[in-house]
Image (spheres, helix red, strand yellow):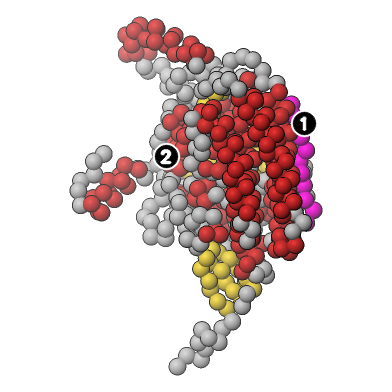
């Protein structure tokens, strides 16, 4: 506990002058809007850039974790190449990130691991809403459920997927919950209005 | 009149769950059967879906920490450790050595508790009722330590981003040593009950075989992967929280069947005791919290951090936009991914084997559905 208290004391003492400042200081914390990445060293970025010169746009490292950004149509060939030639035989996860203000709305993220190299990398791509990325299930069976979850949560349909259904939510659920425009409070209020016949409280 | 009625077909669809006691929660399995033989199993999951990832986007980093305990509630401490490590990675800080040692002690105790629950329920599914009562007795010792340390027994929220909230209580070392002393001979006792037991061996050997290639294809990790003969453990492969200081073995199996997975988990408990004894011997003095700002605002960026949870690789992928709340928080749950291999493992097995196989995956539906 005493260790916990120490950092608390400082801001409390300096609080009054800080409270007076804000109007002047407010516009300042805008610039850091990009990831402070460094170039990815090693043999893989060279291999990827050589095989996919037009599709691979970035090979970077952030916090010691490497990732490659590629065009959506190149993702499956890259997974294939990494598996066949660089031993990335374990597809850890597939997920997406929603940026509604961007024209290519979603970031699709594939996390790969190689047992032989003990190395983990990410393959990222940007896709627009409505674009159907090809499935990775032919390359890694585990992609089956992971892609179903991405579909369930974001509404990204995977072309050629063996079983493209919702997985966690009921079949009749409307919308896709992890899209940024789906708000928890709206869902709550709607449910309350429908089931309790009163106006939502939040 | 139709040419063929359902009576002519040999195929039968059987619903198992979601209220079936052997499905360990609200898992529903739709089995396609030919007599007693299973032709395919389709898992229907999501009954326990709470939208943990969406909640994460709507809470600050500290506010979200207690939610992770509610995913794999049998191993709440492990979940908390993974989350804290992920946020610490984004902040680029490391917990002080004292905090790391206490984290290892509690996490390994939790691994034993989680494996004990697995053993009890798995044995119960097979028909051995006694072990369930025994494991609860040993688990109690461990939960008592959690209760004395942080006040909670199940959903502990034991760690904080940057270290620990609480200093250890007087006598933690003695309690932990006593618990180790107590648990270790009991593991032998369970083995005497089960390992050579004819019914146990008969029900588990050559059931639900998943070999190395299948494991990698399905992304299966944890004891299931090790039972297939892959000597891979994140605590060794990519050590975190100071695991590199401790001396322990990675137990492996040879066949990748249900019996091997049982043996691997039993040995893992012994190895956990070994780690705990080393860690508790030399908990260093010093602060328990790193220098963490009161308001956590990680710089813009993303990180994926994973740990070896009792069920397998538990990962957190967090995207920060520089605000107090995660922009995206993805949990890579081991149970969810491991469960996908159920269809492969049950093909050609008998209905009774399905019960054994569900037990051997060691799923917690709170984590599968999130």
Note whether A166 is above or below B139 in the view shown: below
Q: Which residue is mark 2?
A: B55
C-beta proximity under 8 Å, tags 1 and 2 = no
Note whether B176 is above or below B24 in the view shown: above
Q: Which residue is mark 1?
A: B247
Q: Quadrant of residue B240?
A: top right
- Tell me which residue sits at (70%, 43%) in the image: B186
User: Is residue A194 among the parts visible in the rendering?
Assistant: yes
Counting from the top left corner in percent of width and height, residue B18 is at 48, 61
Q: Which residues are magenta?
A: B243-256
- Tell me which residue sits at (64%, 60%) in the image: B126
Is residue B240 shown left or right of residue B296? Answer: right
Q: Tell me, yes or no, whether the highlighted magenta stretch contains residue A72.
A: no
Is residue A53 shown left or right of residue B151? Answer: right
Nearer to us in this view, B308 or A173: B308
| Label 2: chain letter | B
């Amino acid at each position: 506990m005493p260790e916990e208290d120490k950092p608390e004391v400082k801001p409390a003492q300096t609080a009054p002058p800080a409270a007076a400042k804000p109007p002047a200081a407010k516009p300042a914390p805008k610039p850091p809007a990009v990831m402070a990445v460094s170039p990815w060293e090693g043999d893989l970025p060279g291999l990827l850039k050589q095989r996919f010169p037009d599709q691979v746009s970035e090979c970077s490292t952030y916090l010691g974790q490497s990732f490659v950004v590629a065009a959506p149509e190149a993702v499956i060939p890259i997974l294939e190449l990494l598996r066949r030639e660089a031993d990335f035989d374990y597809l850890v996860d597939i997920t997406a990130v929603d940026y509604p203000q961007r024209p290519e709305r979603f970031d699709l993220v594939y996390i790969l691991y190689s047992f032989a190299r003990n190395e983990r990398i990410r393959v990222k791509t940007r896709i627009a809403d409505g674009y159907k990325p090809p499935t990775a299930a032919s390359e890694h069976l585990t992609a089956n459920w992971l892609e179903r979850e991405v579909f369930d949560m974001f509404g990204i349909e995977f072309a050629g997927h063996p079983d493209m259904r919702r997985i966690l939510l009921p079949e009749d659920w409307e919308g896709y919950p992890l899209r940024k425009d789906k708000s928890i409070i709206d869902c709550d209020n709607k449910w309350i209005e429908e089931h309790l016949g009163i106006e939502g409280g939040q | 009149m139709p040419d063929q009625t359902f009576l002519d077909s040999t195929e039968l669809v059987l619903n198992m769950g979601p209220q079936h006691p052997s499905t360990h929660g609200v898992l529903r399995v739709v089995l396609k059967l030919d007599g007693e033989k299973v032709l395919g199993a389709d898992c229907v999951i999501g009954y326990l879906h709470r939208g943990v990832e969406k909640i994460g986007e709507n809470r600050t980093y500290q506010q979200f920490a207690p939610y992770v305990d509610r995913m794999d509630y049998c191993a709440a401490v492990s979940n908390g450790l993974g989350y804290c490590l992920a946020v610490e990675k984004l902040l680029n800080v490391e917990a002080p050595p004292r905090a790391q040692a206490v984290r290892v002690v509690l996490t390994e105790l939790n691994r034993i508790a989680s494996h004990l629950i697995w053993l009890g329920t798995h044995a119960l599914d097979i028909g051995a009722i006694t072990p369930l009562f025994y494991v609860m007795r040993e688990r109690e010792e461990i939960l008592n330590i959690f209760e004395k340390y942080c006040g909670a027994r199940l959903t502990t929220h034991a760690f904080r981003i940057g270290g620990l909230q609480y200093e250890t209580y007087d006598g933690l070392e003695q309690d932990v040593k006593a618990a180790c002393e107590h648990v270790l001979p009991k593991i032998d006792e369970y083995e005497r009950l089960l390992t050579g037991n004819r019914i146990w061996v008969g029900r588990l050997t050559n059931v639900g075989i998943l070999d190395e290639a299948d494991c990698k294809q399905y992304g299966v990790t944890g004891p299931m992967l090790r039972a297939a003969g892959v000597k891979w453990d994140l605590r060794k492969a990519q050590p975190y929280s100071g695991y590199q200081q401790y001396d322990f073995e990675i137990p492996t199996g040879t066949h990748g069947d249900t019996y091997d997975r049982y043996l691997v988990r039993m040995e893992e408990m012994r190895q956990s005791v070994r780690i705990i004894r080393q860690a508790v011997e030399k908990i260093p003095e010093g602060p328990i919290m790193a220098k963490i700002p009161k308001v956590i605002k990680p710089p813009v960026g993303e990180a994926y951090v994973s740990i070896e949870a009792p069920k397998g690789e538990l990962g957190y992928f967090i995207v920060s936009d520089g605000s107090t709340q995660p922009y995206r928080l993805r949990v890579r749950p081991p149970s969810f991914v491991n469960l996908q291999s159920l269809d492969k493992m049950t093909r050609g097995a008998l209905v009774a084997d399905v019960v054994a196989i569900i037990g051997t995956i060691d799923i917690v539906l709170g984590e599968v559905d999130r």
